[in-house]
Image (spheres, rainbow, N blue to C red):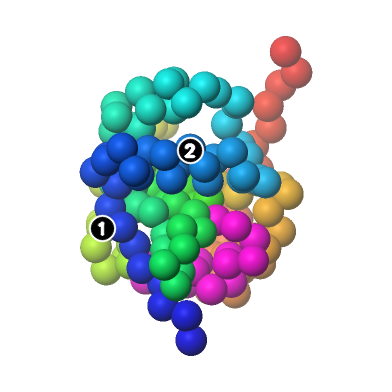
Amino acid sequence: MKQVEFEQVEPTEEQIVTLFDLLETRLHKISYQETSYSKHKDFVKSQPYRDWFLIRVSENYVGSFYVSKENTIGINVADEYTSLVVSSIINFVNKNFKPLPLIPSVRSDRFAINVPPSSTQLARELRAIDAKIAQVTYFLPS
């Protein structure tokens, strides 16, 4: 069985490059807009999340995930590794993090994962661990 490892984003220069490379190859997107490396670097250095991790399988980086201050978990992983890593991510988060307290109309008191409609593998893996759909979100046309 392949070993799944998580590397906390510090962020080092190497990690910033790795995150950018992963971002450029991401198939499933929710809020990502094409960006320059310089803007990406500024974003990563701003440490926008409660915690952020690179996912490594057999010495290869296959994705990343973060835990936000809004109690969301963002999972960005190559499709071919989704079934291998999702349960490891959930177990890791449950072991190492507690949801931040409820703030009505701002954040839930439970962790949630936003799933792009195109990421059917991620949705399947979440259903397999008995995760429930909480909402469906639509963007209005601009």
Q: Position of residue 77 (x, y in %)?
A: 55, 56
Along the viewing direction, whichever of 89 and 103 lies nearer the viewer: 89
Image quadrant in which you'd find residue 138: top right
* Mark 1 burial class by Cα count in 10 Å: few <14, some 14-19, many 20+: few
* Dot label at residue 20: 2
Residue placed at 41% from the left, 67% from the top? 59
The residue to which callout 1 is attached is: 97
Magenta stretch, overall SS: helix
Residue placed at 60% from the left, 49% from the top? 115
Residue placed at 68% from the left, 27% from the top? 139
The kind of residue on which mark 2 rests is Phe
Q: Earlier in the sequence, mark 1 or mark 2?
A: 2
Tell me if residue 43 comes above or below residue 93 in the rendering: above
**Which quadrant of the figure contains the C terminus?**
top right
Residue placed at 71% from the left, 21% from the top? 140
Under tag 2, what secondary structure? helix
**Part of the protein shown in magenta:** 77-91
**Is residue 2 at all visible to an observer of this figure?**
yes
**Is residue 109 at all visible to an observer of this figure?**
no
Q: Is residue 41 magenta?
A: no
Q: Position of residue 65 (x, y in %)?
A: 43, 52
- Eye-nearest disc, 1 or 2: 2
Apparent side of residue 72 relative to residue 121 in the rendered image (left or right): left
Apparent side of residue 121 relative to residue 106 in the rendered image (left or right): right
Mark-to-mark CA distance, 1 and 2: 26 Å
Q: Is residue 84 magenta?
A: yes
